[in-house]
Amino acid sequence: MIVFIAIVVAIVAFKIMRKKQYENLEAEALLSLGFSSWNIISYVDEYVTVKSRQTLEKYDDIKFFKENKEKLPRAEAMIQRKSEISSRLTQFLQSNELQSRPQYKKLKKQVEEVLNNAASYRIRVSYISSAGNNLGSKDIHVGQYRIDSFKKDPSLLMGKTEYNKFLKEQQKEALAQKQHDFYNQVNAIIDYANNNRDSLIIKGSQEQLDSLIGQLFDRTVNSIKKIKSLDSEEWGLIEDFITRLKADIERIVASNQRILDYYASPDFQKIKETCEVLMSSQREFNEYINEKVHSISELFGTRVVRNETVNEDEYNYIRPYKKTITPFTAEVSATVFASAENNPLDYIVKNFYPNKSAYPDQIQKLYHLVEELQTLREAKQIIENYKADYQQYLGDVPAYVMENDEAGFYSRLGFANIDESVLTVEYKFAYTSGGGMAQRSFTVPMTEETIAELIKTLESKLTASAFAKEQRTMMTKKLREAIKTRDDFTCCNCGNSTHKEPNLLLEIDHIIPVSKGGRTEEANLQTLCWKCNRTKSNKILA
């Protein structure tokens, strides 16, 4: 009996020791893993009860998440957590310092049980009878790949009505994205045009670019808005148009860049250095003419830049295109446009001379404009004569430069540049329809005859006293020639003449300046060379 008791005591002591050993081993393993216990995750994550065996058999993850869409994020979060735990446990089993310890097999079995729990997100579906008896159950295993499929195709979890609505929304979004993609193509062209416009030097290039961008707005933005289906043939037509227009714009920029590259080349620098030596005697003359060209801009405004967004879109996708317009451009309605075509001078006064108190000053400017334009026309011919004298020093200038930018070429050599646009001041009326589809314009060039009529129109609106004070005779071409002939084409101040210097620019000067009461009549007019006239300014020569 004593022996039996001793054996029982020994067995109990051994079990207690083994239990203590395992508890210590388990504690070390949990500490190593960073777990508080093995119950960190459960085997079943969701419980569902159904009322028939047929429902039990057909029940799947789609039905569960259709009925519990709010649990989809929870399921994904749980799967991710289980995946992290599984990765940590797997790494532990592969390498740890406890493998040689007693009862490690038992610990390993515990770890594998937790790994099994972490294998997936589990939904347990049970068929419970009305009497409360459990007549069957099954587990549905959901992995990350299945969650991803639901997220990729939300329609899997939708009913018929919801699915149809979803399809419509998808089509709407796809259409909006396609429109946005086309808007991006349009914007890329607008950005390219804006970035390169100011560097275009070939005459007419900026106008060509403006025209192409105008077509871009008219032919694409309006059409993009109107297309209502993804499979419309219009997408292809717009794509082809954009491709062609982009190529046209790139050709314009490339042609201009080719000339700019020449101006940066050693060949052009050599020509420029040669001409700078020869130009020394004419530099002052060219500076004087450039001053006169600039004075017209000061008198009648400079070209201005404004944003030209032909079509506004509700999301402001389309960026503005900047183009240059003349200072005298009136954007008017269709009615005003038609009336202005029939009676342009009256509408020039209404739109460009609204302040009657400023008429006296504006009339004087118009008189001065006539005189300056006549001088510049004569100077233009003299400059052409100078250019002819320089031909022998120019060397082999590429034909494409002279054909496309002759004025710019000579301007870079130091010659004064009198462009025809400077010699032709004009007023412009423009009409653009609300949608931007219809655009019309016409100009009224300010010839000597038109300026004379405009002056008469302005003078007719002055009071009698103001009219008497401001009235003067216009410096006509015939009068200019008469004064030069009278003075034998000789400067009345220094005695230089075209007999001595064929390319001498002669100007007609008011002996008593207009600003000091002098009139435009033969007794108050004299011939001066450009140098003496430049020196005199508005003084009275002794």
Image: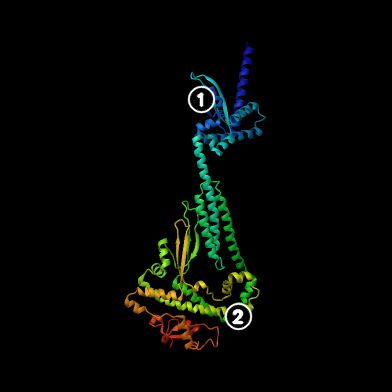
Q: Is residue 467 left or right of residue 221?
A: left
Q: Work out whether mark 1 precedes mark 2 in sequence or the reverse, and give the earlier one.
A: 1
* Residue occupying image coordinates x 45% and y 79%: 371
Q: Quadrant of residue 276?
A: bottom right
Q: Is residue 201 left or right of residue 333?
A: right
Q: Amino acid at mark 1?
A: Thr
Q: Which mark is residue 341?
A: none
338 or 530, nearer to the observer? 338
Q: How far across and down, in percent of the image, does residue 150 sit? A: 55, 36
Q: How far across and down, in percent of the image, does residue 512 sit? A: 41, 84
- Residue furthest front in the image: 342
Above or below, 273 against 178 in this view is below
* Residue occupying image coordinates x 58% and y 57%: 244
Q: How far across and down, in percent of the image, does residue 513 sit? A: 41, 82
Name the residue tied to disc 2.
389
Q: Report whether residue 4 is seen.
A: yes
Name the residue tied to disc 1.
49
Q: Is residue 185 left or right of residue 520?
A: right
Q: Amino acid at mark 2?
A: Asp
> Callout 1 environment at 10 Å: few (<14), some (14 to 19), or many (20+)?
some
- Confirm or deny contact between disc 1 and disc 2 (CB under 8 A): no
Above or below, 493 against 192 in this view is below
SS label for mark 1: strand
SS label for mark 2: helix
450 or 274, nearer to the observer? 450
Colour scheme used in the picture? rainbow
Q: Quadrant of the N terminus?
A: top right
Q: Quadrant of the C terminus?
A: bottom left
- Residue furthest right in the image: 100
